[in-house]
Image: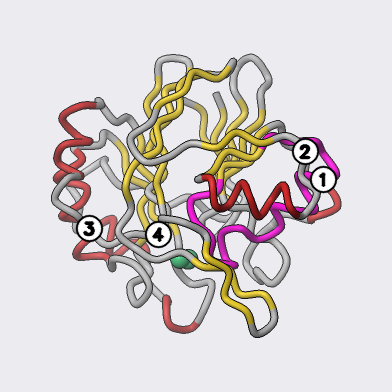
Amino acid sequence: MKLSYHGHSIISIETNNGVRLMFDPFITGNELTDLKLSEVETDYLLITHGHNDHVGDMLPIAKKTGATVIAIPEIIHFATKNGVENVHPMNIGGTYSFPFGRVKMVHAQHSSGYELGDEMIYMGSPAGFILEIEGQTIYHAGDTSEFGDMGLLGELFGIDIAFLPIGDNFTMGPEEAVRASQRLKAKKVIPIHYNTFPVIQQEPMDFINLLPNGVGQVLAIGETIEL
Ligand code: NI
Ligand code: MN
C-alpha cells in the first residue's frame, strides 16, 4: 500500500486494492499542505478529534466525494447534522472490520471541541486509530500527550508504523515522542503535527536523531512511501 504525508496531521493511504483513506483533512487554512481541496478524492475520512485543524475540510470533502466518515459519535452527529450521508461511528476501544481492513479507535490524551463563530461545539473525546491493512499495522496517534498505555498498545499490536505528533505546545514534543516511540516499539516512526503554526515549530531531524538508527523517518510534504 502507499502512505502519503500532506502536512500537519493529514495522512492518506491507498491500499493495494485501490481503497483510499485520509486522516484529518485540514486543507483550508493550512499553508503547508500540498493538497488542493477541489482535487481531493477519498473513500474514507478518519477524524481523530474535533479541533478545527483536524476536522478541517471534512464536510465539503465528504459531501462532494461521498466518503464515509469514521469518527467518534459526537463528530458523526456534527457531520450528519451538516449534510454528510455516509458515516461510521466508533468509540474508544472498539474495533470494526471494514472492507479495506480493521480499524481500532484508541485513547488520546487531549481535548476536543469545534470552534464555529463564537460557539465551541462539543465533539466528544479525542482519539487515535490503529489500522490493520494488508498485513501492516499503522497507528495514527491524533493529538496527544505521551501516556503510559502506549506500552499496552505496543504489546497488543505489533505496530509497523506510527505517526506521532512532535510539535509540542498542543501535543507532546520531541522528547515525549521519543519516550512514546519506546513504549510503542513501533518499527518505524514518522513525525506529524509540526511547523504548521509558529508555536509548533520543530526541526524534525532533531527528533529523528534521538531515535535508534533506522526507526525515525521524516516525510516531506507530498512524499509517498510504499509498505
Ligand atoms: Ni487538537
Ligand atoms: Mn491539532
Q: Position of residue 41 (x, y in %)?
A: 77, 39
- Callout 1: helix, strand or loop? helix
Q: Which residues are magenta?
A: 47-68
Task: Check residue 146 in the rendering and tell me which mark sits there, or answer none.
Answer: 3
**Amino acid of disc 4:** Asp
- Callout 4: helix, strand or loop? loop
Tell me which image quadrant ligand 1 sits in: bottom left
Nearer the viewer's eye, disc 1 or disc 2? 2
Nearer the viewer's eye, disc 3 or disc 1? 1
Q: Residues within 10 Å of mark 4 (few under 14, many from 20)?
A: many
Q: Are marks 1 and 2 in contact (CB under 8 Å)?
A: yes
Which residue position holds label 1? Answer: 63
Which residue position holds label 4? Answer: 143
Tell me how far mark 4 sits from mark 1, CA to CA: 25 Å
Nearer the viewer's eye, disc 4 or disc 1? 1
Q: Position of residue 159 (x, y in %)?
A: 29, 31
Q: Quadrant of residue 93?
A: top left
**Amino acid of disc 1:** Lys
Q: Position of residue 205 (x, y in %)?
A: 33, 61
Query: Which image quarter is the N terminus in?
Result: top right
**Amino acid of disc 3:** Glu
Which residue position holds label 2? Answer: 85
Q: Position of residue 152 (x, y in %)?
A: 16, 36
Q: In this figure, which colouring scheme has been used for the structure?
A: secondary structure
Taking depth in this image into account, of 100 and 216 the one nearest to the observer is 100
Q: Earlier in the sequence, mark 4 or mark 1?
A: 1
Nearer the viewer's eye, disc 4 or disc 2? 2
Q: Residue at point 33% right, 72% down?
A: 168
Q: Residue at point 38% right, 55% down?
A: 191
Q: Earlier in the sequence, mark 3 or mark 1?
A: 1
